[in-house]
Image (cartoon, rainbow, N blue to C red):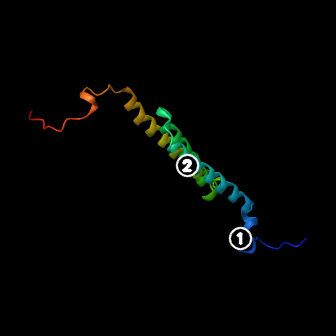
């Protein structure tokens, strides 16, 4: 066979350059809709201490789907993946740092847990 030279990206069909079709995007879109409905339904429920962890979990799953598929992180080079993972770890450290601080504080000593509106001069 004769060498046809290097293929340019402009000569390739758009769907062939990524190796996936439109169905992948519709599946991810449907998953995002399901998680959005789940967010709305669980936001109207009183789940006690599970409200915040559940909301953060759902939001993290939705953000991960967007980054992986719509921002094409699944096809990204190694450096981009490292930056993504490090940013996720940084966010987790910050979240656990804030909650760790809140969980280890003693309860407020003010009556009814309401801060005083009187100035410090009293």
- Is residue 48 left or right of 81 when viewed as pictured? left
Number of marks drawn: 2
How packed mark 2 is, by other alpha carbons closer than 10 Å (few <14, some 14-19, many 20 or more), is some
Screen quadrant of the N terminus: bottom right
Q: Position of residue 70 (x, y in %)?
A: 62, 58
Q: Which of the two residues, 61 or 86, is positioned nearer the viewer here? A: 61
- Within 10 Å of the Cα at label 1, are there few (<14), some (14-19), or many (20+) other Cα atoms? few
Relative height, residue 31 to residue 6 (above, below): above
Residue drawn where x is 47% and y is 33% of the image: 48
Q: Give the structural element (helix, strand or loop) at label 1.
A: helix
- Which residue sits at x=82%, y=74%? 4
Asked whether the beta carbons under mark 1 and mark 2 sit within 8 Å of each other, the answer is no
Viewer-nearest of discs 1 and 2:
2
Height in image: 31 above or below 115? below
Q: Residue furthest front?
A: 45
Q: Which type of secondary structure does the marked residue at label 2 adopt?
A: helix
Q: Position of residue 26 (x, y in %)?
A: 69, 59
**Residue 55, how many percent across, how many down?**
51, 42
**Image mark for residue 29:** none
Badge 1 or badge 2: first in the primary sequence? 1
Answer with left or right where residue 22 lies relative to residue 48. right
The residue under label 1 is 9
The disc label shown at residue 84, or none: 2
Q: CA distance from mark 1 to mark 2?
A: 26 Å
Q: Quadrant of residue 21?
A: bottom right
| Front one among 29 and 19 | 29
Residue 49, percent across and down? 47, 32
Q: Quadrant of the C terminus?
A: top left
Residue 13, quarter of picture: bottom right
Instruction: Using the image as rendered, state which of residue 101 and residue 16 is in the foreground.
Output: 101
In the picture shown, does residue 48 fall above or below 16?
A: above
């Amino acid at each position: 066979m004769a060498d046809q030279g290097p293929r340019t990206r402009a000569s390739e069909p758009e769907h062939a350059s990524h190796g996936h079709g439109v169905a992948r995007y519709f599946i991810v879109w449907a998953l995002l809709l399901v998680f959005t409905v789940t967010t709305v339904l669980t936001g109207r429920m009183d789940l006690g201490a599970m409200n915040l962890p559940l909301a953060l979990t759902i939001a993290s799953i939705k953000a991960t789907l967007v980054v992986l598929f719509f921002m094409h992180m699944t096809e990204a080079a190694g450096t981009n993946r490292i930056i993504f993972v490090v940013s996720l770890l940084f966010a987790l450290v910050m979240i656990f740092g804030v909650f760790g601080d809140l969980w280890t504080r003693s309860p407020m000593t003010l009556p009814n847990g309401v801060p005083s509106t009187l100035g410090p001069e009293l």
